[in-house]
Amino acid sequence: MENDYSISELLTVFLARELKDGEVLRVGVAMPVAEAAVRLAHLTHGPNMDLVFLGARMNVAHLETIPMPAFGWDRRVVRWAESFSDTGHRFDRVKDWNNHVFFIGGVQVDAYGNTNLIGVGPDYRRLKFRGPGSVGTPTLSTHVGRYYIVLNSHNPRVLVEKCDYVSAFGWGTGGADARRKLGLPGGGPRFCITPLCIFDFAEDTKRMRLRSVHHGISPERVRQETGFEIVMPSSVPTTEPPTADELQVLRSRVDTAGRLRV
Amino acid sequence: MNTERRQRIFDEVEAAGWLQDGMTVAIGQPTPMALVRQIIRRGLKDLTIVDAGFSLDLLIAAGCARKVVSYYAGGGFGNPVGPSFRRAAERGEIEVWECEEGILCAGLQAAAQSLPFLPWRGGVGTSLPEVNPDLKIFMDPLRGETLIAVPPIKPDIAIMHAAHADAYGNVQHVGGPGWIDLFMCRAADRVIVQVDQVISNEQVRSDPWKTTIAPADAIVRAPYGAHPFYSRGYHLQDNEHLKLYSEAANRAAAGDRKALDDYLERFCRKPATHADYLELIGIKRLLALYEY
């Protein structure tokens, strides 16, 4: 029973524990782990969190269930909204975003947490893979207090030494002052979360460092599946598993359709 | 002398007639599909499209777009990228004006305010100014901070969908406009809004705070005009129909255009009017979506 949870459930619970009561959590489309994590955190320890989905701001901690949307563009999440950013400027109050938290994916992610949603290939006019575009990630990553890189695959094509293009600036070419030098007020990426492991960023260089590996995964496997040299501590713990209570809330009150269990 | 106030109601064929080859067209959310289908039916070419998602992909598939101003071209239904956008961009058939949400807002706002540029911080340190040379990095003259100068993005025409408008162009959304709609309307030379229902001028006057676009240049009667998208206050999104397009576009991206051409012919080119399109979709399907 001890390991009777899926990787997506493990990542959801890990992320949920990261989120603090009173924070404003902004989730875009096509990020099921982040969507589940903010709901779980809201129900377990965040009655004063605000959840922002596609411009709709809500507090729904009183609900028995906060199910996941049926599909990425499901605008019916607005049934929970208390207000919308869509009537004004979505980015009117970036000065207040220090307690905002955001989640970001990428076609590529590099050793310093820069992310790429633009595309892959040396010639921008003839990309080998054209990505979806930057959405709002350049502005969000510039201003939010911190953000999490959440990946649904871990391989050397995604985790690269240097992104072909950068759509959201993480730590640039490294160094604790990389963001300050550019005048970027937000705190930058805190962790990079993958199906194999959790990375954090070394304090001085801001290069990705292996923080923990998931149950059954060796640091060597992570090294093989990563396209850059990882800062490797002498000992790497196993990612702490979900508790029975966390899984109970997640399965019965958030992921009621069981999408994260596969 | 004529003392009667001019009404602004046009049908979708007349209103789409304002569009010409080579224009810049901004498209709101939910997508004004009755007007988009007329653009495709007319076979307009070389448009610069300011849009995201399904309608953007459809206009590219139909060969209407030369340039795309887009912050996001996601595909939905398991496609991380719109299939027609991806194929056309990779083959160099469309030019992409690379941006993001904040930069797009700044560019539209600069156009609305007749400014040569507006500054934006989001994107500093990224590749956006490299892949889009219209975006200029500059040093702000007051505090010496590094910022991006975003030039005006000026649509010739913005097309929108809303729940309600009166005959004089006063638009009242139900549940608010799409997040970028009002930026597009302020920036564009002319605004066409298709609506689920034309309401009375008295109803508008009873709650003028509800008026979101004031005024639009043309109002088009288009019940279910957002189909296959949702319209707040009227109907849900038709996922079965969107999947039909998605599968056809995926096959086209893999090299077989037949299903996509069939889709375009059947749903966009053949129905001469929006009413013909609704007949094709069928009353049963439409009624099944009639809740929100």
Image (cartoon, coloured by chain):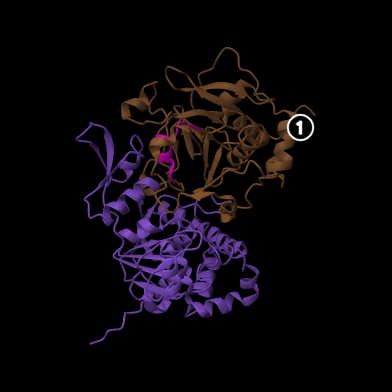
Residue at (35%, 61%) from the top-left corner? B185
Q: Which chain is brown?
A: A
Residue B21 seen = yes
Residue type, label 1: Asp
Give the secondary structure at mark 1.
loop
Residue at (54%, 17%) from the top-left corner? A232
Residue B54 is left or right of residue A67, and the answer is left
Q: How many marks?
A: 1
The part of the chain drawn in magenta is A135-147
**Which residue occupies the foreground of this view, A125 or A206?**
A206
**Apparent colour of chain B:** purple
Residue A139 inside the magenta-drawn segment: yes
Q: Is residue A7 above or below residue B213?
A: above
Q: Quadrant of the N terminus of chain A?
A: top right
Residue B63 seen = no
Residue, disc 1: A4
Measuring from the top left, give residue B247's x and y in whole percent.
58, 60
Measuring from the top left, give residue A61's x and y in whole percent.
63, 41
